[in-house]
Image (spheres, coloured by chain):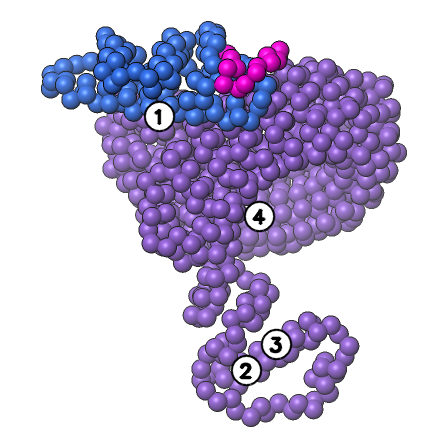
Chain colours: A purple, B blue
Amino acid sequence: MNPTKPRCNFNSPSLFRSLTKPKSTQIQNINILFFIFIYLFIELMLSESVFCLLTEDLLIRILDRVNSDRKSLRLVCKEFHRVESTTRKTIRILRIEFLLGLLQKYCNIESLDLSVCPRIDDGAVSVLLSHGSVNWTRRIKRLVLSRATGLGYVGLEMLIRACPLLEAVDVSHCCGYGDREASALSCAVRLRELNMDKCLGVTDIGLAKIAVGCSKLESLSLKWCLEISDLGIDLLSKKCLELKFLDVSYLKVTSESLRSIASLLKLEVFIMVGCYLVDDVGLRFLEKGCPLLKAIDVSRCNCVSPSGLLSVISGHEGLEQMDARYCLSELSAPLINGLKNLNHLNIIRINGVRVSDFILQIIGTNCKSLVELGLSKCIGVTNMGIMQVVSGCGNLKTLDLTCCRSITDVAISTIANSCPNLACLKLESCDMVTEVGLYQLGLSCLMLEELDLTDCSGVNDIALKYISRCSELVRLKLGLCTNISDIGLAHIACNCTKLTELDLYRCVRIGDDGLAALATGCNKLTMLNLSYCNRMTDTGLKCISNLGELSDLELRAIPNITSIGIKAVAINCKRLANLDLKHCEKINDSGFWALAFYAQNLLQINMSYCNVSDHVLCLLMSNLKRLQDAKLVHLTNVTVQGLELALRSCCGRIKKVKLQSSLRFSISSEILETFNARGCKIRWD
Amino acid sequence: MSKEKASSSSSKMISLKSCDGFIFEVEASIVMKMQMLMNLIDGFDDIVTIPLPNVLGEHLAMIIEYCKYQEEAAIVTKEAKEKFEVDFVNGMSNVTLKHLIRAADYLDINSLFNFLTQVLADRIQDMGDDDED
């Protein structure tokens, strides 16, 4: 292909200036690149593909800067598709049918997420690894296998041995995993991060194997691994000396394990939520140990008292994060004195403790770099106390005042004026907050992203108008705010275009008009809760169906919605994953049929007390291949045989089912045993 | 934990504690046959008691007996070895056999696992169509 003579004037002043200005060569190159790009596009867009003139590495650098999502990028042309395939670094696989094909196409991936791929098992892994070229494993650094309960130690070991560069593995919530799986994990010699939350079968022996095999471990999470005892922690502390992050929440470890943990010289974050056997003696070991400790979490440890916490604080004046939720009843005087020395503290969460204005004043005067303060359910929080804290801590970004019922508009105004960077404010159950305080919030806190006003009866339409000035709002909770109506919602819809989560639980005055405004204005909504909004009808639901990103929708007990509305939602909301239709009695078979046919991404559904019949229920359960959790309590039109057939059709895929307890002895025990054997939990209501 | 000084690791005694509280003193060389516990012995020099929360005392006793025999089996003839194996499973109920297989799988003792699974396979083969267990 011959390039024609450029029509553009090379002596044009702007180009000359851009070429001779003393910028760095890289910026010059990019400028030239873009110029070539645009020139070629204009010259040759009618004839041949522009991009075959650009070499692949230039194309990669240009496409890196393009801000659209990868899927649409792939579909532009073959060159883009090829470039996208070679540069894709992470992938999350949704369906097991595509697993093999996708992995052969994307051979440079560094992060593989199989957590939402239902029922991946040893057989699938052995097929993956034996089929032709397995160069997709050569660069994998991160493997996410959370909730992949079907994968056993054989498959796990094969997968881990095939990935030589593996650095991070997440096997959380694989409840059946035990020491054999831990032994498989210890084959990953370069492992740095390991998440084993809720691997209930892992004992000290499995932990010891990991400690010996993965000596470079930097981050380990063992939440809920109840079989682990002091011995395991002791062995871990002797071998994994590089540990920076350790989470031993809810384990039955005693203070002795803290003696071992104190010897970990590089530990920076230590989390021990709910360790009820650990007391102040254990925390005293930490006083002299872990010199680099930056964050400690002792929430819900019943035996910890203020003096234990004081020992940790006195040893670490560089502490940045302190979490002591629901474990102390009050802060002793020495502890308050100790807080004076913590000038680097960024995060304090002391939910449930008794505070006073004096304590809050100390925090405000001394902890100047505070970014997050959690006082949820604290007794004794008053306007004066809050004003003293926020006037000292101007950098506050997150403030949690849930159930601090004495807070009024005065405090909110002070917060608004002192903390312009506020991003998250939680005021659940603060009844005395009204539009006066929220006016100030709307004026000053324009960076606000999350606002929780659940159960604040003082919030009305005018308040919503003032709040809507915070155009960066992403999460808004207005549950139980019975005084708001469509007018207020329209204000929010007009200005808060970035909203992704909205909770309107029991806001009974919301109707179709408000929802129409919402659907037009907030098209990025992913989570919407409209339970008990009685005035809603099918018209409103049709407007909701225009929200293309919607994935979580709760529509409990709405009496006027019928199959027409549900059909619209099923067809248009393609990403719908979580749907709650409990007590929606006017929805009949045609609505559920539409769900069965169109809502292919549904993961969880609650159909309790709905009018669905046998064959449509069976169709629903067998057609929705990604369904993992179904609540089927009191389906009056469904017979026992129909229910059994429906259960049988989804047996291999589904993970949780809820049924009414009166059926416990009517359903054949054979089905119950099959479900048990396949790892599916049946809950009886 | 009290430290026991041993002249060489092969004569070091390790205590294995079953889930119902029985403690068995065995030599380190026998514990090495249990692949699952091998890392513990190699990696940590001063370990004395290993808790086994997944194995019952009576099964652990039988497993240790088998492993001890394996240790001495090098100097014994093939017939004596076969006689020991027959005696070992003679009269053993299927339930106990299943428990032993699970324990052998958990502790990763290849020889015992292969032997017991073969025994169970033979029993299944010998079972008639109308035999219930």
Q: Which residue is mark 2?
A: A40
Q: Are marks 4 and 3 in contact (CB under 8 Å)?
A: no
Residue A632, given in percent of the width and then of the height, sits at 36, 30
Mark 4 or 1, closer to the camera: 1
Chain ID of residue with mark 1: B
Residue A122, given in percent of the width and then of the height, sits at 35, 38
Indicate the amino acid at tag 4: Thr
Circle 2 residues within 10 Å: few <14, some 14–19, many ≥20: some
Circle 1 residues within 10 Å: few <14, some 14–19, many ≥20: few
Does any portion of residue B10 appear in the rendered image?
A: yes
Q: Quadrant of residue B84?
A: top left
Chain ID of residue with mark 3: A
**Dot 3: element:** helix
Q: Which residue is mark 1?
A: B110
**Dot 1: element:** helix
Mark 2 or 1, closer to the camera: 1
Of A247 and A97, which appears nearest the observer? A247
Indicate the amino acid at tag 1: Asn
Q: Are marks 3 and 2 in contact (CB under 8 Å)?
A: no
Indicate the amino acid at tag 2: Leu
Mark 4 or 3, closer to the camera: 3
